[in-house]
Image (cartoon, grey):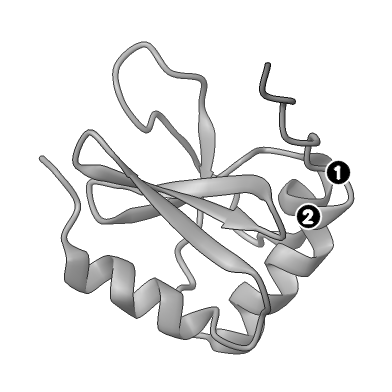
Amino acid sequence: MASTKAYLDFILEQLSELEEITYRAMMGEYIIYYRGKIVGGIYDDRLLVKPVKSAISFVSDVTYELPYVGAKEMLLVDDVDSKEYLTNLFIAMYDELPEPKKKK
């Protein structure tokens, strides 16, 4: 099942306090970037983020889910209704996220 543009728009609105939030459509799903780094994505209308230590500490109910078959587990973010929560989660994660790979 692909994610809907409406869910993407909702998540982007929730993150509107942050600068440099971008996304890229990929096979019916959406990869979410914060200041050039991949934070996670929207898969089957679920917000999943990379399981870095700061995110695991920040999320109160840690639930791992697969974005798609064959992928690494990611953290499910249930509390998407709180702008403040999502904003603070992305800020907390930023320093631990890997730098983007250099294009050749």
Q: CA distance from mark 2 to mark 1?
A: 6 Å
Residue 99 left/right relative to 14? right
Residue type at the position of mark 1: Glu
Q: Position of residue 38 (x, y in %)?
A: 62, 44
Identity of the residue drawn at 22% across and 46% down: 44
Residue 35 left/right relative to 70? right
Depth check, front residue: 44 or 104 = 104
Quick one: which residue is furthest to the top in this view?
A: 70
Identity of the residue drawn at 19% across and 52% down: 3
Question: Which residue is denoted by mark 2 in the rendering?
Answer: 93
Question: Which residue is denoted by mark 1 in the rendering?
Answer: 96
The C terminus lies in quadrant: top right
> In what element is the residue under mark 1?
loop
Depth check, front residue: 37 or 47 = 37
Q: Position of residue 88 (x, y in %)?
A: 74, 75
The N terminus lies in quadrant: top left
Q: Position of residue 86 (x, y in %)?
A: 60, 74
Residue 62 left/right relative to 43? right
Residue 44 in sight here: yes
Quick one: which residue is furthest to the right in this view?
A: 95
Q: Are marks 2 and 1 in contact (CB under 8 Å)?
A: yes
Q: Position of residue 99 (x, y in %)?
A: 80, 36
Residue type at the position of mark 2: Met
Residue 87 left/right relative to 48? right
Q: Residue 53 falls in which quadrant of the image?
A: top right
Identity of the residue drawn at 86% across and 43% down: 96
10 Å crowding of disc 1: few (<14), some (14-19), many (20+):
some
